Image (cartoon, grey):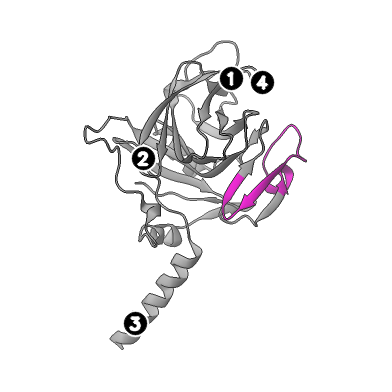
Amino acid sequence: MKKSLIILAAAVLTLILGTVSLAAPVTPNGIQATALMDFTNLENGEKTMGDLGFWSVDMSKTVTINNGLITVNAGDWGAFPSFGDDEKNILKSADGLGFYVAAGEAGGGIGCGFNSDTTVNYVLAQDKTAYLVDKDGNVTEATTYFYADTGQGIIDIPANFAGYVYFPYESYIANDGTKAAFDTASQTVATLIFSTSTTGNITYGEIYAYSGEYTPDDSGKDDDKDPSAEDGDISVLAYAAAAISCLGGITFIRKKR
């Protein structure tokens, strides 16, 4: 009986590890990330923004889906589906936003804005800091600069980069002429807006809220070993077991690292 249970458990584990590829994010020292949304339920292939329930000024604009990753063409922008109440509650107590991102040989540039639940649009200000973290845990501080095509701050993503980017809330200002700082005491993030520069295509993965403050680690490594480097990470079981809800193929998830 015990042997049968072990075999059954191994079979279930194999099934889960074979179908759930989402790994815990690599974070800078001092920061914890909670996953809010991923795209693993979307079918592979080229899809329009309208097909996916995204928003765009041109709903016929296309993106490419590949195993839970969304590649946005250079120079395009739009909005992901709005967050639900559970995700908004996490975002309200967070210190910033995070994404999995990857760029090709040309590199690229990304902006990350959002609409709050009070309908105010927020964008990245100039000369603010964001954190790029590669899969080995190496942290690079990136400085936002004004990008005329979108009228807001963006950061550059290096060629062939694959990892995570973290934007502190303090990097955001209201896009309504007041340039007021974002204040979670009176509002929260409701809808994320993505944009890419004309340099190159950008691939997006999971979306996170993060808490904490980056503190450089004297050891030279800013985080633990990359969980995705392992053939199978037990942390994926938390994703598989978590209660999830779907909106147009988008999965809302919560997992704190």
Region in magenta: 47-70
The mark closer to the camera, 3 or 2, is 2
Q: Is residue 148 above or below residue 218?
A: above
Q: Determine the residue located farthest toward the left in the rendered image.
A: 218
* Amino acid type assigned to the residue bearing label 2 in the image: Thr
The residue depicted at 58 percent of the width and 23 percent of the height is 120
Residue that label 2 marks = 27
90 or 155, nearer to the observer = 155
189 vs 223, left or right, is right
Quick check: can you spot residue 184? no
Q: What element carries label 2?
A: loop
The residue depicted at 36 percent of the width and 82 percent of the height is 7
Residue that label 4 marks = 149
Residue that label 3 marks = 5
Measuring from the top left, give residue 246's x and y in whole percent: 58, 53
Residue 228 is a magenta residue:
no
* Amino acid type assigned to the residue bearing label 4 in the image: Asp
Q: Residues within 10 Å of mark 3 (few under 14, many from 20)?
A: few
The residue depicted at 31 percent of the width and 89 percent of the height is 1
CA–CA distance in space, label 3 to label 2: 36 Å
Q: In this view, does 221 lie above or below 250?
A: above
